[in-house]
Image: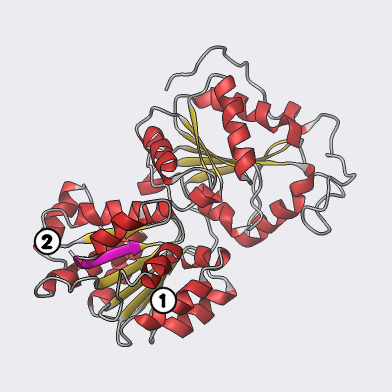
Amino acid sequence: MLGLPARLLTNLETLKITEPSPIQKQAIPHAMNGRDVMGLAQTGTGKTAAFGLPLLSAILRMEGRPAPKSVRGLILAPTRELAKQILDNLRDYADGTSVRIGLVVGGGSINAQVQRLAKGTDLLVATPGRLIDLIDRKAVRLDLTEFLVLDEADQMLDLGFIHALRRIAPLLKADRQTMLFSATMPKQMAELAQAYLNNPVRVEVSPPGKPVEKIDQSVHFVDQSSKTGLLIEHLSQHQPQAALVFARTKHGAERLRKHLEAAGYAAESVHGNKSQGQRDRALRAFKEGEATVLVATDVAARGIDIPSVRFVYNYDMPNVPDNYVHRIGRTARAGRDGTAIAYCAQEEMSEFRAVQKVMGRDIPVAGGTPWEGAGKGPSRGGRGRGKPQGSRPPQAQAGRPRRSRGRKAA
């Protein structure tokens, strides 16, 4: 398949990956031929394999071991969760080979990472901040690095990693192969590609910002103070199926998790105030079904690859409209169906309208009606004075089911 080495094909068959996804079918042949690639595809469409398999194929053709502290291929990711997900996938693809794959992210012991890098690394998955810390300590050298991948490059721009990238990229070999993958294509992305890619092949399997078609989307217009009650009622309809809930702030996410626990749900949370160990344990509990609800900030929007997630709730509308696409992309993965439900308060109408503009479509209304006179001015500018259209409050139109009492099944 696509000219991959026999060992990788065997591993893919074991993983029940027998047919390439559209992004893989388009990107892998160019990458195998050494071309720079700019790939645009939604989350959950197999981008990791699209760059990971060609990298592993190239590494397997190399002779000898990497020099001490050196890195043959570098993969940069914006968040710890995404970096760990990439690492796990690459290790599955490379099972039984001699390829040495490493991970350096914040939140872990930097001394342990220094020791692991000392032996040399074939493929290194890293977050930009921690990599720069290790460069400053002279714990890693990139002058022999022949491959660079920028995964979820649009989020790197959102998180301000462009300055780190400008420092890291010149340290690599000038004649390297570079691949850039992204779910959206903001204006800066073209500038990024022009600066770091050499005559790249552009592959695109869906319009930027267009969500996976298998996701059933809806919105409820509801007061901010009524969101938690509505969420609990919606969760009661499909427990114990896994649900991912997105909140805007770290404190809001933690507060919501406590409310859900008090209501009897096995809930965990992932956000910036959690240590890496806490985040890993929460994700593991969610993946293994010990927790059926995970509350997260956008730090997790692109770092969760759990096929069992059937429901995604936008408890708060995202400040960055593109993040809506990444959030709902946590469901309907690997060809499955999914459901994405958004709650929009009066003061969030600007964010809601921005999301619909990015997607180029209207989100079906399942409860309430759009707030009048709200969200037409600057975003987050107070609650405003608009009222929802219609005689009933939005939560009353949402079809509130009877809530069962007691702890929900995990």
**Residue 334 spot, x, y in % from top left:** 35, 48
- Colour pattern of the rendering: secondary structure
Q: Is residue 393 left or right of residue 144?
A: right
Q: Is disc 1 placed on a helix, strand or loop?
A: helix
Q: Which residue is mark 1?
A: 168
Q: Is residue 248 left or right of residue 244?
A: right
Which of 362/167 is in front? 167
Q: Main secondary structure of the magenta part?
A: strand
Callout 1 crowding tier (Cα within 10 Å): few <14, some 14–19, many ≥20: some
State whether residue 44 appears in this view. no
Segment colored magenta: 119-125
**Residue 389 spot, x, y in % from top left:** 84, 39
What amino acid does circle 1 point to? Ile
In the rendered picture of this protein, how many numbered marks are placed on residues? 2
Figure check: 263 above or below 198: above
Q: Is disc 2 placed on a helix, strand or loop?
A: loop
Figure check: 68 above or below 303: below
For marks 1 and 2, give the CA distance. Answer: 27 Å
**Residue 338 spot, x, y in % from top left:** 47, 41
Q: Is residue 51 left or right of residue 189?
A: left
Q: Is residue 2 left or right of residue 390?
A: left
Quadrant of the rendered structure where residue 410 is?
top left
Q: Which residue is mark 2?
A: 98
Residue at the (39%, 33%) spot, across then down: 285
Image quarter where the N terminus lies is bottom left
